[in-house]
Amino acid sequence: MAMASPANGTVCPAPMKATSNGAFQDENPLDYALPLLIVQICLVVAFTRILALILKPIRQPRVIAEIIGGILLGPSALGRNQKYMDTIFPKKSMTVLDTLANIGLLFFLFLVGLELDVRTLRRTGHKSLGIAVAGITLPFVLGIGTSFVLRSTISEGVSQAPFLVFMGVALSITAFPVLARILAELKLLTTDVGRIAMSAAAVNDVAAWILLALAIALSGDNTSPVVSLWVLLTGAAFVAFAVLVLRPVLAAMARRSPEGEPVKELYICITLSMVLAASFATDTIGIHALFGAFVVGVVVPKDGPFPGVLIEKLEDLVSGLFLPLYFVSSGLKTNVATIRGATSWGLLVLVIFTACFGKILGTFSVSMIFKVPFREALALGFLMNTKGLVELIVLNIGKDRKVLNDQTFAICVLMALFTTFITTPIVMAVYKPARKGAPYKHRSIRRKEADTELRMLACFHSTRSIPTMINLIESSRGTRSKRGGRRLCVYAMHLMELSERSSAISMVHKARNNGLPFWNKKRDSNDQMVIAFEAYQQLSSVSVRPMTAISALNNIHEDICTSAHAKRAAIILLPFHKHQRLDGAMESFGRSFQEVNERVLRHAPCSVGILVDRGLGGTTHISASDVSYKVVVPFFGGPDDREALAYGMRMAEHPGIVLTLVRFVAPPGKSLRFGVRLVGITANRDKKLILDDDQFKDDDDKAEDEALLSEFTSQRSSGNVGAKEEHSMLYEERLVESKAEIVGVLKSMNKSNLFIAGRMPPTAPLIDITDCPELGPVGSFLASSEFSTTASIVVIHQYNSTADHHPLVVDEQEDNSCENEMSDTSVAAIV
């Protein structure tokens, strides 16, 4: 039923009913609110996710895809088809869509407030504060200047004061969540540039909300300055109420939610209701409902599990489903076609130039005053020029309050899109942190100075592999202790995937605050993985340093390799990308984890070991006195086998280890390849045909093999393993005439606890088909279910400085190690 307006005679559409009776009742579901809303949500989510995938190779944040998706679904592109607009986004559905989008926005800004720790603002240094102030002031002033030009051309008749403030705010905002995402993607969070940018953006974020409150107060229908003053004073009183009343209530609930116990559903319900009530209060005051949600998020105590549970409950639903609706709601108001004619396009260029010039010049100038190097200062300027969701909020509020008309709104949306889009490629071009490090000597386990400290970088994805990793570390520590020799120092690195979730950025931000390179000793950390390693350190003489790497899986290998170089590691231990099921079969975690291992093999600055976990020592850490393992090293020759044997010899020093060295020998005149044309697979899966045996094992190589075997015999017979008997280091030599005999020998030992094998020995592949070429011809067989379901495997690849590898960290001379002080900490989120 339509209603006629007596004032102007226009016909308003009747409100939509919620649900239909179904297509079989001759009713179109798209004429009803709920089914139409479902279609809209599915379309928006699918469309923006596809755009995000398309833009991912050029490392654009998801907000770019959502802004573009909103514009394309609106009247600028698909919306030019009137039938499409009347069917999918009819005007009568806009109230429901906008309401749901704003509900999602309320809770998203509550999450943004949860991420913002006010305590970090108090610790903001003079440098970051000065850069933040300059990054706000100059673009704000230029925005006011631009507003005069716009008012004289395309925005005639709008109220002057609100328009000036809205344009100033629109040009001076830095999007804190979007900036954090870009810094994480570019691995700049832990550099000086990243630290300054994050601190300055946090100050900018708070200033932007204050300025926006001022703009909203000035843009009411009642233009009396007394009313605007009352709005501001009442808004300030609400903030005080939130700090003095709401915060103690939230803190009490947080205290009653101890670690390890579920947070009561009542507390979650009270908090979310508090968000809605605060939003109602600020809307009643006249400074928009979003402020109430944001303020409640800010006053929630940041310590303990309470904020983490709130984020976990909300973020997937809000960020994944509801927030894209806000971008579409904004896109439906954006009609690029309104920008026509030389004047309009000239104004678009002017607004973009003013926004970029003010932000970049203000930030760059003050950075140079604080003696930030030129490239870092320029990168800071472009990073602080990042716009995003808060920009769209400002613009939408301005349009709803009739401060911005359609043309000005479209120009400002395109400005926000352009400035954010150019950030990543320009920062990548301008600022490339030079990964340079001081050279170090011990890059492998085998070394001339046997009593020097062994440094190991042990990586893990989940708690599943921690017991085996700790038991392997315990077995590796050796027993020589003369003047502190043979010490073992382990850097335990938790590998975490950087997801699109806001909690990932919150986690990165907290990690960054704890300082490089270790977890803060005074932290309130409840990471069970870290606790496991710290408990082991208390019970052993091994020095364990927990670390965390947070990156996308396609480049987390950079964090691993640069950390290994920074910590002067001799070996990187990686978890195999498969785990063993209860039935004994190997199940993959995914191709992405396998690719991480392959990239580390390609770029590692030291030796690499891949651990195939079959429960070494069971599911718990075994104390030193209870260690009792049988370790087997199959030896064919070559550098990788020598490294594996060197590792085994170190293990043999442990009183609970029995090491068996099995040397495979071919009959005279034959080789261990048994007529097979050997193909050496490099770390990056390049296949190189080995024409004859001497290429793989020349005279020098054979001499090194014999030298190490001689050293093994000497250690075995000299009693250099403490009070252990000679039988704790066993030697067997097997004459084999086919690979079937090799397989038979290895299977006869499959009841051993651990096998240590070289990655590329000079022998024929022991298994015909494998999906794990990174393990080599022997390791891929040992890792198969056909071989064993109880023996864990470590496949060793020896570092070779003359090989065809691609280092991520370039060695520099010691006297130049401080020249790039800002650039040397370019690991992403390493704590």
Image (cartoon, rainbow, N blue to C red):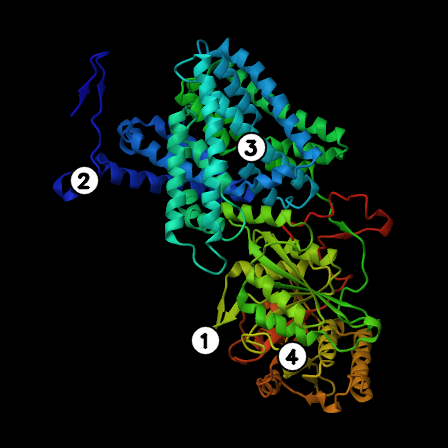
Q: Kindly identify the amino acid type of the residue bearing the numbered disc 2.
A: Ser
Crowdedness near tag 3: few (<14), some (14–19) or many (≥20) residues, C-alpha within 10 Å: many
711 relative position to 294: left or right: right
Q: Kindly identify the amino acid type of the residue bearing the numbered disc 3.
A: Asp
As measured in the structure, the alpha-carbon distance from the residue carrying label 4 to the one carrying label 3 is 69 Å
Please say if the residues under marks 1 and 3 sit with CB atoms less than 8 Å apart: no
From this view, report whether residue 788 is shown above or below residue 242.
below
Crowdedness near tag 2: few (<14), some (14–19) or many (≥20) residues, C-alpha within 10 Å: some
Q: Using the image as rendered, state which of residue 705 and residue 158 is in the foreground.
A: 158
Q: Earlier in the sequence, mark 4 or mark 3?
A: 3
As measured in the structure, the alpha-carbon distance from the residue carrying label 2 to the one carrying label 1 is 50 Å
Picture quarter with the N terminus: top left
Residue 460 visible here: no
Q: Which residue is mark 2?
A: 20
Q: Which residue is mark 4?
A: 675
263 relative position to 706: left or right: left
> Of circles 4 and 3, which is in front?
3
